[in-house]
Image (spheres, rainbow, N blue to C red):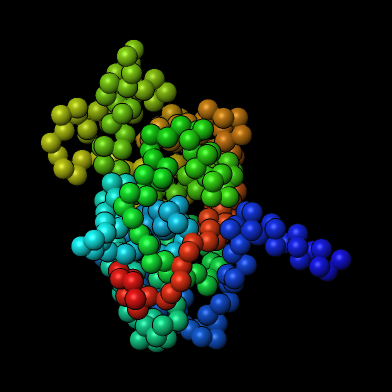
Amino acid sequence: MALQKFLVAFTFCFVLFSCVNALSSNYYDKTCPDAESSITQVVRKAMWNDKTVPAALLRMHFHDCFIRGCDGSVLLNSTKNNQAEKDGPPNISLHAFYVIDVAKKQIENMCPGVVSCADILALAARDAVKLSGGPTWEVPKGRKDGRISKASETQQLPGPTSNISQLQQSFTQRGLSLDDLVALSGGHTLGFSHCSSFQNRIHKFDKKNDVDPTLDASFAAKLKKVCPIKNTVKNAGSTLDSTTFLFDNVYYKLVLQNKGLFSSDSTLLTNSRTKNLVSTFASSQNEFFKAFANSMIKMSSISGSGQEIRRDCRFIR
């Protein structure tokens, strides 16, 4: 019976989480007990200086996990012979890499060669959410850092123009469900987007409509003013919701009002399961927070092919 239970647990782990049984919440308790508190201090200080840091760290972690698993590959610099993930088109706007660098330097001084860059990023993303008013959770730790990072692979990332079928396929391939999709989309409660990510909705949408008919008309008009068809303002764009520095459930309320910024936001209303979850999270911030924390644990446990502990997060050893 004990062997049968083990085999069932192992199969569940392998199928859904790419066998992440090596991860544990107390992984560094003996080898680097102050790692988490050190990372939290670094994130908090960075937030004081730059309010955009939480959104940046959360997005960075998503983009890391969706390419080759959560292995810190998004942190690697390009080299003469290789263009890395961070220089792929979807990642050009990623920033705040310095936060991970500062945290890594501090931890290396305390516990050299012990804590992976992938774990630092996962913990920093959790802290970013918590310090912005969102939920917290125990981050499974023990990831290893990957040695491969290719800009070409970033085309696998789900994009802002994705429809529900495309999103579901992307998440399913990574062991994530429709419920995870809706919960993790709530990360759009933080951040800002340049015009290019939603331009498709407000100019020449299709042969019949200039503007996406599923977009609230007054909201679309505001976006068109900020992002005219011949936009010349380099950093023009829009916040993802109306409380851009606060982690809350306002995002879902806006999606229900047809004021979600991206096509990938509005498409959540085209499936009965995802639409019901949007309504649930819009009505209950506590339900959203619980679901988001659980889905973050699941996503951050997507196994990578990491083989080492980097001393500098930007370069392989």
Q: Inspect this view and state whether residue 180 appears.
A: no
Residue at the farthest front position: 81
Q: Residue at x 45, y 52 (%)?
A: 66
> Does the rendering let one see residue 80?
yes
Quadrant into which the C terminus falls: bottom left
Check the image and name the residue furthest to the left: 232
Residue 252 percent across, percent down from the top left: 49, 39
Considering every residue shown, the one lying at the far top of the view is 208
Q: Give percent across and percent down for residue 206.
A: 33, 18
Residue 77 drawn above or below residue 236: below
Whether 6 is drawn above or below 252: the answer is below
Residue 225 occupies quadrant: top left
Q: Is residue 47 left or right of residue 249?
A: left
Q: At which x and y percent is residue 228?
A: 19, 29
Q: Residue at x 56, y 33 (%)?
A: 275
Quadrant holding the N terminus = bottom right
Nearer to the camera, 161 or 147: 147
The one of 113 and 52 positioned closer to us in this rendering: 113
Q: Residue 98: which quarter of the image? A: bottom left
Residue occupying image coordinates x 54% and y 46%:
173
